[in-house]
Image (cartoon, coloured by chain):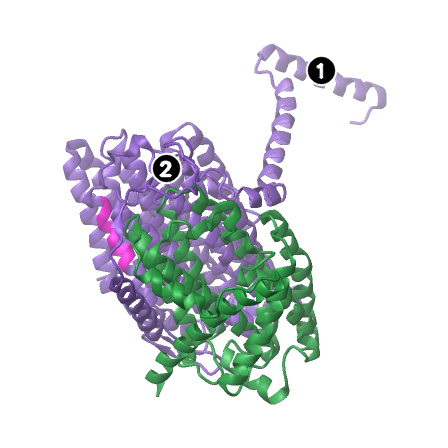
């Protein structure tokens, strides 16, 4: 099994899906699922392989190189698995829409290009795949037109800025070392001057910061997540955004090397400390903005920005624990955010696209599977013990506290406590709370939606109770970066300064629940009553007149909303407005009317003649 | 041995917590110049509640309250009560912090399934209040963990028993004061009684519970009193070598906070958050800076 075959299957498969779609939609759906599952199987067979393959297509005289190692395998398996689940989820969601052939083509293309990114062994192919990813994503974000087109434009403008920065970095590398092979570069770069290295880290960093939506370059994300078709959110929020994380890992620990990347600068002004602080800011501010959102997808989008901060904080500090936490959090976050977007998708599918939190509610009895998915999803997002999010956050906190960064730890912990507020808002407003009259006949979601939700829910619990499974792989990645090995066991991490044993934790909580449950069962059985049959302390509550979820956090909203607006976005909007005015000014000159241009030319020549006659310069 | 501890420590917590409930009613009554109910009244209430009828609004309604109480019980297994800490080897301070989430979240998920405006208001207040006091609390905990360079609460206690209480050691004094300032909010007593506010939103999140559900909610309340005070005793008053000393330390702290409870009226939620984010946060923040600088 080789990598080029894998990429060929991915790319050709996406094109064939498009062609098959012209024949019959069943064929297209079957083939899309088949291809994406085949990729998962193929990649899982590549586990543990290391290798490099060169192809002399001779693009600018540079070979195209593919390579595989544990880092790329880890990202590839996550990309392909989440991609496959998103394709399955798309089946019923997208069935009755227009341009579905195009949708599947772009979805599979985005997946294939991500696989290309993680398997590329030189920066040229990296860049090419990166661009394919950006453009296919743009086309999918703006799939629904209207506001989606504006969101897509925002995304692609930021993406282009990132790509241009990356291109400059590549040119600089090529001019200095005459190679763009990652393996060769990683032997040259450690001897580069600090100034050049810092330049490279920053210029590539811009591209990755944009993709990972770190503040202050995050503004493309809320619109893009909210407007993209919901099944595509699975791919977009899960791994596509986190290609920025892959980029950072590649840049800092593979190309530059841990020893150089971590000691660049002095005192508080070190590259990695500043990156960690950017991450911390990205945790805190978006978390509070998320609390103020009333749109389910916008809320999840802002939360995704905040969680991206944790990953950056984890990897920026450069300890083996923090690195493991950062990489593990990338995987965990992908799992539960995809699950949560799928829950929103199921609700949208059954309610005709409703995602306003204040108009939903009470879906727990209508869609129990989606509710369990959402419950596990928010548990992971908060990081409640027994879910995967807990382990990775625990690793990050522990690093921050023991390495002596209490203020960074404070930012990270605050993020979690803010997270509880918006997570509860999400689940309460959608699944608990009052069921509006018009949704009394809502059906539960079809199997093609339940299946990926169940798989992801199980993954959350599996990685939460037995975190050793992914941590073993992550530990191998850490060792390949030159970090010391962690004492990983199947149920957690052992160390002198505070161990973690998730099995004991699991047993304790399970036992607690059983004991309390039995005590409750010993009492008289509760009478089951309808949701509206409540005790109102003597006051009559009119039915279906009030919706208690509106303005749920109003006291907080009044306090913090003046401070937690997206000031950066307003700044960019102002910038755009300013440029538009400038261009508007230019447009007055470039009228498009030939007569005016002739007049300009005549005037210009006249001025030249005048100057020549007056001063005889030439 | 561990099995005995696993049974004994929640039981001890339960007894102390319920005793505190009874004691608080008695002391409050005496401050009000009333005679007050007998000190065993909560026990009588719980037994009576178990024989009464109740209603349920669905599965989550039942599961939430179970999760809430189970969460509190598990916290106690990780928390050193004197020298008893059966599960502290499986996770330290961070695990305790996270497990403490289960109780309010369980109640919130359970109450959310009923369509009751009072529950809704109560839960919203509870979550906001928690956000309010968690900010200073996290700063305080970080100061303690940074000072002792460990995330294990057992080690924090052990070091204090060798070198003296954290509260009177100079670097952590401000953090200790900040903890005292937010303790009423953690315990949910006046002036931070706004989550239940019986006269206003008829017990808020608890309004839908009756019979066994209310009994479990009462037990959970007792345990949360225990956890809030035990955490303070462990972090700042050096824990204790035997359960009796531990109990006495807790008793002193609890009675002092009861005086605050008796003397103050209720805050509105905005006032509560403003208070919590002003002085306690400032003290805790300066406390953390001192710890970082001294180190």
Q: Chain of mark 2?
A: A
Q: Chain B appears what colour? A: green
Q: Which residues are magenta?
A: A449-458
- As drawn, the residue found furthest toward the front would be B35
Residue at x-position 27% and y-position 53%: A526
Q: Which residue is labeled 2 in the image?
A: A360
Q: Main secondary structure of the magenta part?
A: helix
Badge 1 element: helix
Q: Chain of mark 1?
A: A
Earlier in the chain: of badge 1 and badge 2, it is 2
The image quarter in which residue A45 lies:
bottom left
The residue carrying pointer 1 sits among few (fewer than 14), some (14 to 19) or many (20 or more) residues within 10 Å by Cα, namely: few
Q: Is residue A172 visible?
A: no
Q: Measured from the top left, where is residue A41 in percent x and y?
A: 21, 58
Q: Nearer the viewer, residue A479 or A557?
A: A557
Q: Measured from the top left, where is residue A25 in percent x and y?
A: 17, 34
Q: Nearer the viewer, residue A447 or B118?
A: B118
Which chain wears purple? A
Q: On the rendered structure, is A349 left or right of A177? A: left
Check chain identity for marks 1 and 2: say if they share one: yes
């Amino acid at each position: 099994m080789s990598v080029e075959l894998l990429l060929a299957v991915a790319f050709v498969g996406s094109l064939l899906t498009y062609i098959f779609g012209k024949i019959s939609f069943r064929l297209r759906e079957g083939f899309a699922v088949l291809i994406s599952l085949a990729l998962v199987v193929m990649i899982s067979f590549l586990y543990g392989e290391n290798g490099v393959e060169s192809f002399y297509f001779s693009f600018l005289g540079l070979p195209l190189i593919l390579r595989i190692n544990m880092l790329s395998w880890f990202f590839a398996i996550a990309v392909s698995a989440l991609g496959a689940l998103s394709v399955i989820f798309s089946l019923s969601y997208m069935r009755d829409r227009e341009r579905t052939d195009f949708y599947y083509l772009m979805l599979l293309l985005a997946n294939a290009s991500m696989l290309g990114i993680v398997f590329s062994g030189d920066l040229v192919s990296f860049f090419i795949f990166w661009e394919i990813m950006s453009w296919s994503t743009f086309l999918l974000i703006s799939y629904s037109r209207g506001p989606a087109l504006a969101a897509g434009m925002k995304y692609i403008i930021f993406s282009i800025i990132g790509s241009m920065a990356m291109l400059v970095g590549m040119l600089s590398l090529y001019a200095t070392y005459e190679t763009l092979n990652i393996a060769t570069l990683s032997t040259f770069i450690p001897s580069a001057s600090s100034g050049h290295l810092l330049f490279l880290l920053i210029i590539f960093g811009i591209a990755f910061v944009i993709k990972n939506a770190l503040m202050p370059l995050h503004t493309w994300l809320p619109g893009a997540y909210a407007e993209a078709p919901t099944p595509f959110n699975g791919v977009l929020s899960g791994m596509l955004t986190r290609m920025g994380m892959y980029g950072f890992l590649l840049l800092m620990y593979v190309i530059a090397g841990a020893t150089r990347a971590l000691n660049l600068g002095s005192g508080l002004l070190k590259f990695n400390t500043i990156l960690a602080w950017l991450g911390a800011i990205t945790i805190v501010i978006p978390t509070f903005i998320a609390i103020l959102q009333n749109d389910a997808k916008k809320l999840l989008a802002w939360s995704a920005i905040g969680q991206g901060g944790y990953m950056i904080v984890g990897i920026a500090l450069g300890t083996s624990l923090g690195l493991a936490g950062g990489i593990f959090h990338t995987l965990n976050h992908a799992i539960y955010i995809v699950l949560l977007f799928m829950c929103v998708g199921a609700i949208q599918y059954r309610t005709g696209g409703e995602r306003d939190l204040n108009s939903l509610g009470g879906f727990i009895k209508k869609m129990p599977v989606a509710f369990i998915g959402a419950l596990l999803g928010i548990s992971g997002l908060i990081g409640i013990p027994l879910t995967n999010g807990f382990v990775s956050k625990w690793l990050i906190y522990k690093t921050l506290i023991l390495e002596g960064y209490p203020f960074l730890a404070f930012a990270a912990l605050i993020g979690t406590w803010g997270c509880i507020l918006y997570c509860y808002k999400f689940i309460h407003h959608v699944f608990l709370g009052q069921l509006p009259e018009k949704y009394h006949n809502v059906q539960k979601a079809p199997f093609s939606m339940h299946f990926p939700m169940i798989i992801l829910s199980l993954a959350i619990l599996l990685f939460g109770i037995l975190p050793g499974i992914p941590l073993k792989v992550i530990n191998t990645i850490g060792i390949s970066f030159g970090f010391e090995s962690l004492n990983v066991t199947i149920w957690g991490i052992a160390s002198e300064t505070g161990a973690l044993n998730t099995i004991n934790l699991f047993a304790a909580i399970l036992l607690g629940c059983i004991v309390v449950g039995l005590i409750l069962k010993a009492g008289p059985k509760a009478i089951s009553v309808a949701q509206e049959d409540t005790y109102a302390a003597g006051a009559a509550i009119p039915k279906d007149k009030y919706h208690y979820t509106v303005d749920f956090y109003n006291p907080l909203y009044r306090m913090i909303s003046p401070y937690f607006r997206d000031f950066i976005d307003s700044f960019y909007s102002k910038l755009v407005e300013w440029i538009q005015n400038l261009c508007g000014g230019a447009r007055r000159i470039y009228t498009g009317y030939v007569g005016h241009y002739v007049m300009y030319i005549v005037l210009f020549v006249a001025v030249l003649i005048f100057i020549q006659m007056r001063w005889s310069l030439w | 041995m561990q099995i005995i501890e696993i049974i004994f420590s929640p039981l001890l917590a339960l007894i102390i917590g319920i005793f505190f409930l009874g004691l608080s009613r008695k002391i409050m009554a005496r401050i009000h110049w009333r005679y007050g109910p007998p000190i065993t009244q909560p026990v009588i209430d719980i037994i009576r509640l178990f024989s009464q009828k109740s209603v349920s609004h669905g599965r989550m309604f039942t599961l939430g309250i179970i999760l809430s109480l189970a969460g509190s019980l598990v916290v106690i297994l990780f928390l050193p009560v004197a020298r008893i800490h059966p599960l502290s080897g499986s996770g330290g301070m961070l695990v305790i912090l996270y497990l403490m989430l289960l109780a309010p979240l369980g109640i919130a998920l359970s109450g959310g399934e009923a369509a009751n405006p009072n529950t809704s208001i109560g839960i919203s207040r509870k979550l906001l209040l928690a956000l309010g006091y968690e900010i200073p609390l996290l700063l305080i905990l970080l100061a303690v963990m940074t000072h002792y360079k460990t995330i294990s609460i057992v080690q924090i206690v052990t070091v204090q028993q060798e070198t003296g209480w954290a509260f009177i050691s100079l670097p952590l004094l401000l953090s200790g004061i900040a903890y005292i300032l937010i303790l009423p909010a953690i315990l949910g007593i006046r002036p931070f009684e706004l989550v239940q506010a019986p006269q206003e939103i008829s017990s808020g999140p608890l309004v839908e519970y009756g019979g066994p559900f209310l009994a479990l909610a009462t037990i959970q309340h007792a345990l949360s009193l225990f956890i809030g005070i035990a955490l303070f005793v462990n972090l700042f008053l050096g824990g204790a070598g035997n359960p009796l000393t531990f109990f006495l330390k807790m008793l002193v702290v609890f009675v002092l906070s009861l005086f605050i409870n008796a003397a103050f009226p209720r805050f509105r939620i905005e006032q509560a958050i403003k208070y919590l984010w002003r002085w306690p946060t400032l003290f805790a923040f300066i406390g953390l800076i001192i710890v970082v600088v001294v180190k």
